[in-house]
Amino acid sequence: MTIHIGAAPGEIAETVLLPGDPYRAKWAAETFLDNAACVNQVRGMLGFTGTWKGHRVTIHGSGMGMPSLSIYANELIRDYGAKTLIRIGSCGAMQEAVKVRDLILAMTSSTLSTPSRGIFRELNFAPSADYPLLRAAADAAERRGVPTHVGGIHSSDVFYDERPDLNEQMTRHGILGVEMEAAELYILAARHGVRALAVLTVSDHLLTGDALPSADRETSFGDMVEIALEAAFTGD
């Protein structure tokens, strides 16, 4: 048990999927895992552990933004022995070729700041995904026929952005989409020598204004969860 996670020793699997929304964690666990049991409810941040095709998996909420994710990822890695952490979440597209419902696999994540900024000081550290996980996820998406884009994203520390000039430059430089957590996850994975990846469903589009209807979200997010699970256990 830690300050923010009430799970007992052994109740967290080495493979953890991290949706931001705790209720999305509940939905994913009930939909995709066998014998899923709730292992954390501290502060309403739900976590569940079960099995997928015989593999133990924990699906645990991370909250919104890098500071919140940093708390849970640190404790999952340091106190519970998590070895593979995959963010599953939504993002906004920033390229015309990327469509609503498409998948983005974040190879790298640019950011203005993260909770780890104080460690690096003057260094602009470039956080990136674990390549075998990234490759396995891309292969899984191709097998499922899911339109998928691999490249750089932006992890923003604000939801209500008022920097159209910055968005224009990111679009100009090929950034695929924007979300709020992946950069810090990748930094923590590098620091602790574990694997990390962000598998993101495009829920809205910053250029076109398109958005995924609420009624369609679970179906679209299902592909994301299954691709993350397949990637985590490729070769096992």
Image (cartoon, rainbow, N blue to C red):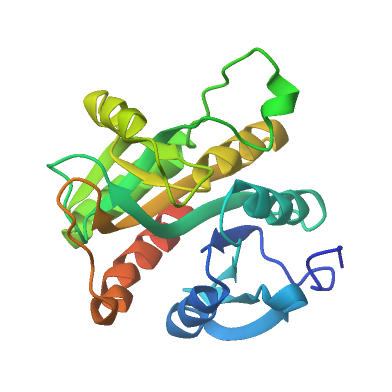
Locate residue 190 relative to residue 173 in the image: left or right: right
If the image is split into quadrants, where does the N terminus sit? bottom right
What residue appears at the point 72 percent right and 79 percent down from the top-left corner? 41
| Residue 236 in view in this figure | no
As displayed, is residue 71 above or below residue 185?
A: below
Decide which of 66, 198 is in the foreground and name it.
66
Locate residue 108 relative to residue 58 in the image: left or right: left
The image quarter in which residue 68 lies? bottom right
Q: Pick out the residue farthest to the front.
A: 162
Q: Pick out the residue farthest to the top.
A: 122
| Image location of residue 45, percent across then percent down | 67, 72
What residue appears at the point 48 percent right and 75 percent down from the top-left corner? 24
What residue appears at the point 67 percent right and 65 percent down from the top-left corner? 13
| Image location of residue 43, percent across then percent down | 74, 74
| Image location of residue 116, percent across then percent down | 69, 33
Decide which of 158, 204 is in the foreground and name it.
158
Decide which of 9, 151 is in the foreground and name it.
151
